[in-house]
Image (cartoon, helix red, strand yellow):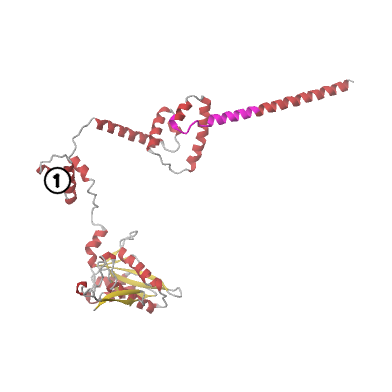
């Protein structure tokens, strides 16, 4: 009997313990759901506008603000690891400067900019503030529009005159303007000139005495390389000489330079690149003909732009439309193309003129003369001429 009572008491205690555990489990679940909802409520911004959001935060408790700041800090740390330099507008800079004054540890809260950057923005804003404040009380007399136009005209037409020289000329006319005012209006019309002579200026002044040479690599029908050697006069765009070979060497290039300058018909300067094919033999022939070699500098593709552009014209207008079989055929085709290039093809670089005009003036032709087309390079191009 005693054993039965103890067994019933044990069963009753187990049922009570299970009931207490179930109630405790429901209480914990309810607490977790309430805490989760509270966290979501705390970390949800009330508005996307900064002024309205600031006003709404005044009514929120400190735990809510701390939780929201902690949540926002984590994405900023993640963005700082992999984000590139952000673009801040002028409004963003002003807001960051103003908010940094209200936060004691503002250096630790910056993630997208450095503290030195924020201080520089503050100095710039301070400079703009005092510039506007000092400008509001300074009533300087304005310079007449006629005087401004006269200053700009003088600065444009007399590039050797400085501000003091212009000031003296204005005093002769009875116009009193200070030096800094003249410098202010001179900056808009006078760009700074580089010291020394530029490469483009040198080419413009000495183009009539400069030849340029370069190589063009061509692949034949059986994928074997061929090399064409060109010499061009820069002023007239005339092709002086063209040669073709399978193995260009220094003696071969020197021989073709000798053929291109017969009877002392040589330029003063000859431009070439730093290729090893322009070696000692080439330099010896140039020295014998009183030619000064100009090597193009490194990383300067425009130094020999005219001769570098000519191979592209040869490819587009001739070689891309023909099959090259052997060396003599390429030489014959290039001779025909060079003859058309020199005698009949207008060039944009010389104002649509011919490098080597060999016809009578257009004024001698009558309006009723017939126009005929002469095929060039097997009919790939045509030369149009007037005949009586």
Considering every residue shown, the one lying at the far front of the view is 368
Instruction: Identify the image quadrant of residue 92.
Output: top left
Q: Is residue 372 above or below residue 19?
A: below
Q: Is residue 222 above or below residue 131?
A: below
Q: Position of residue 363 (x, y in %)?
A: 20, 72
Which residue is at the front of the view, 17 or 110? 17
Q: Which segment did they paint magenta?
A: 30-51
Q: Position of residue 189 (x, y in %)?
A: 22, 48
Please give the count of numbered marks on the rendered protein.
Answer: 1
Which residue is at the front of the view, 7 or 156? 156
Instruction: Identify the image quadrant of residue 314.
Output: bottom left
Q: Secondary structure at mark 1?
A: helix
Which residue is drawn at the image coordinates 73% and 24% (left, top)? 20
Whether residue 249 is visible here, answered yes or no, is no
Q: Left or right of 146: which side holds 203?
A: right
Per the image, the residue denoted by label 1 is 165
Q: Main secondary structure of the magenta part?
A: helix
| Quarter of the image with the N terminus in it | top right
Q: Left or right of 302: which side holds 17?
A: right
Which residue is drawn at the image coordinates 43% and 32% (left, top)? 107
| Quarter of the image with the C terminus in it | bottom left
Say whether residue 39 is magenta: yes
Q: Position of residue 191 (x, y in %)?
A: 24, 49
Q: Left or right of 162: which side holds 257?
A: right
Disc 1 crowd, CA 10 A, few/some/many (<14, 14-19, 20+): few
Which residue is at the front of the view, 228 or 130? 130
Instruction: Identify the image quadrant of residue 261.
Output: bottom left
Say whether residue 203 is magenta: no
Whether residue 238 is visible here, answered yes or no, is yes
């Amino acid at each position: 009997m005693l054993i039965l009572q103890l067994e019933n008491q044990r069963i009753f205690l187990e049922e009570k313990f299970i009931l207490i555990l179930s109630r405790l489990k429901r209480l914990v679940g309810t607490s977790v759901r309430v805490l989760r909802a509270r966290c979501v409520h705390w970390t949800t911004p009330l508005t996307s506008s900064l002024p309205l959001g600031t006003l709404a935060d005044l009514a929120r408790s400190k735990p809510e603000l701390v939780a929201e700041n902690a949540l926002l800090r984590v994405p900023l740390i993640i963005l700082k690891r992999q984000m590139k330099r952000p673009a801040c507008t002028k409004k963003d800079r002003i807001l960051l400067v103003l908010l940094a004054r209200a936060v004691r540890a503002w250096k630790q809260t910056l993630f997208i900019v450095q503290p030195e950057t924020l201080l520089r923005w503050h100095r710039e804003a301070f400079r703009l503030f005092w510039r506007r404040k000092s400008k509001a009380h300074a009533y300087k007399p304005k310079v007449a529009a006629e005087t401004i136009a006269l200053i700009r005209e003088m600065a444009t037409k007399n590039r050797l005159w400085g501000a003091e020289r212009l000031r003296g000329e204005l005093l002769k006319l009875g116009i009193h303007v200070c030096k800094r005012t003249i410098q202010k209006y001179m900056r808009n019309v006078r760009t700074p000139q580089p010291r020394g002579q530029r490469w483009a200026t040198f080419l413009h002044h000495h183009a009539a005495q400069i030849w340029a040479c370069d190589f063009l690599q061509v692949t034949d029908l059986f994928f074997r390389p061929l090399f064409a050697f060109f010499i061009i006069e820069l002023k007239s765009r005339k092709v002086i000489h063209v040669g073709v070979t399978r193995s260009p060497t220094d003696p071969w290039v020197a021989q073709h330079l000798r053929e291109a300058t017969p009877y002392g018909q040589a330029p003063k300067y000859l431009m070439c690149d730093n290729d090893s094919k322009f070696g000692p033999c080439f330099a010896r022939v140039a020295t014998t003909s009183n030619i000064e070699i100009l090597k193009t500098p490194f990383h300067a593709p425009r130094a020999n732009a005219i001769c570098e552009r000519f191979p592209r014209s040869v490819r587009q207008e001739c070689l891309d439309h023909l099959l090259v079989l052997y060396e003599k055929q390429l030489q014959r085709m290039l001779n025909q193309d060079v003859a058309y290039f020199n005698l009949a093809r207008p060039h944009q670089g010389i104002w649509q003129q011919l490098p080597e005009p060999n016809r009578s003036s257009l004024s001698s032709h009558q309006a009723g003369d017939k126009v005929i087309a002469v095929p060039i390079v097997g009919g790939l191009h045509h030369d149009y001429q007037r005949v009586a």
